[in-house]
Amino acid sequence: MGKSGDKQMTALSLPVTGPEETVMQKLLAPLSVLLLILSSPAFAGPQDWQGEWPRTDFTRTSVDYGEILSGGPPKDGIPPIDDPKFQPVSKVEGLADSEPVITFDHNGDARAYPLRVMIWHEIVNDVVGDLPVTVTYCPLCNSGIVFDRNLDGRVLDFGTTGKLRNSDLVMYDRQTESWWQQFLGEGIVGQMTGKRLTMLASRFESFARFRDRFPDGRVLVPRDLRQRDYGTNPYAGYDTAERPFLYAGPLPAEIAPLKRVVIVAGEAWSLDLLQDRREIRRGDLLIRWEAGQNSALDTAEIARGRDVGNVTVQRRVGDHWQDVVHDLTFAFVFTAFYPEGRLNHLP
């Protein structure tokens, strides 16, 4: 293997002990496919993908195809949820108060999407308060983003390609089978190349905080508990690893690549800095941190993950505070997608 292959092997070398071994083996088994690709003379490209993607226009792209890697699973091998099932917060069982959920509310309809479910499906195509949305979560980037599915007069719905770029989920829309970068909400391959989905303000927060804010809210639950090992983390130990998986790009010089950062409009603040100060003001922008939410990417059981806290990002609008679109992700992701961006951190 050349240098890039060596980097990938380093990224995969997480310690595996005890009960976490079986869980990590689930992750590493499909990744062995990637190692075969990396050891071959050239990376896969459109000529290798066309059979699985006959409707995708590979003559149109905004990225170098060499940056797109297989994550192991095939198209929709990580199955999106298209007909989500919800329960009222008062009836939800087995979800710890401190467990992380992605939350979104619109027109009085408030919903929570637990990471214990999202980590196994990554995409939920939903309608919230009459608004078609797709709720996405990329575990390798810890990036949870909600998008409006309306674009150019039609409603899109999304699946997983099984591909990654900068270690980030590459989605596809079923209408044109164009490929989309989840972190940016941008079409990068096919007919939709250059198009942008609208990001909607959402939160990562603990289940208890969502329940307190929305006592009549609803929570995504699996239709079949036997389908996946819900509540477990197949990436145990990932957010304390030295390097990210399946990533050979530039790393941040200032802080460890898997340190969490809060990104707002192309500027980032490290979670360590936010934890130290508890709140940061930038003009009319207010970023706050409070304890009480598990990391989903720490221990094999999500409910036992270390406390990484709750982050809110708001802007004053008139006499009230309004949630602002932001992302809570890793430092390497900010470096990859905002190479000229400003990263504020502790000295």
Image (tube, helix red, strand yellow):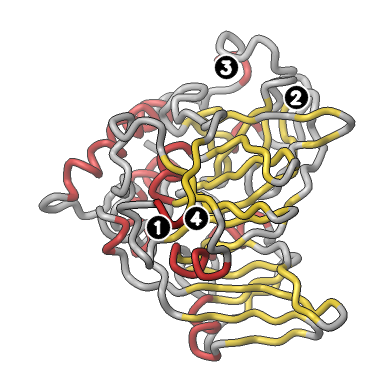
Residue 312 coordinates in the image, percent (x, y): 61, 73
Question: What residue sits 60% from the left and 70% below the top?
Answer: 262
Quadrant in the rendering for residue 83: top right
**Quick one: label 1, few (<14), some, or many (20+) residues within 10 Å?**
many
Q: Is residue 52 visible?
A: yes
Cα–Cα span, label 2 and label 4: 26 Å
- Give the foreground label among 1 and 2: 2
Quadrant in the rendering for residue 136: top right
**Quick one: label 2, few (<14), some, or many (20+) residues within 10 Å?**
many
The residue singled out by tag 1 in the image is 243
Sequence-wise first label, 2 or 4: 4
- Give the foreground label among 2 and 4: 4
The residue singled out by tag 2 in the image is 190
Sequence-wise first label, 3 or 2: 3
Cα–Cα span, label 3 and label 2: 13 Å
Amino acid type indicated by mark 1: Arg
Residue 101 coordinates in the image, percent (x, y): 48, 57
Mark 2: which secondary structure? loop
Question: What residue sits 40% from the left and 48% below the top?
Answer: 7
Amino acid type indicated by mark 3: Trp
- For this rendering, which residue is in front, 126 or 166? 126
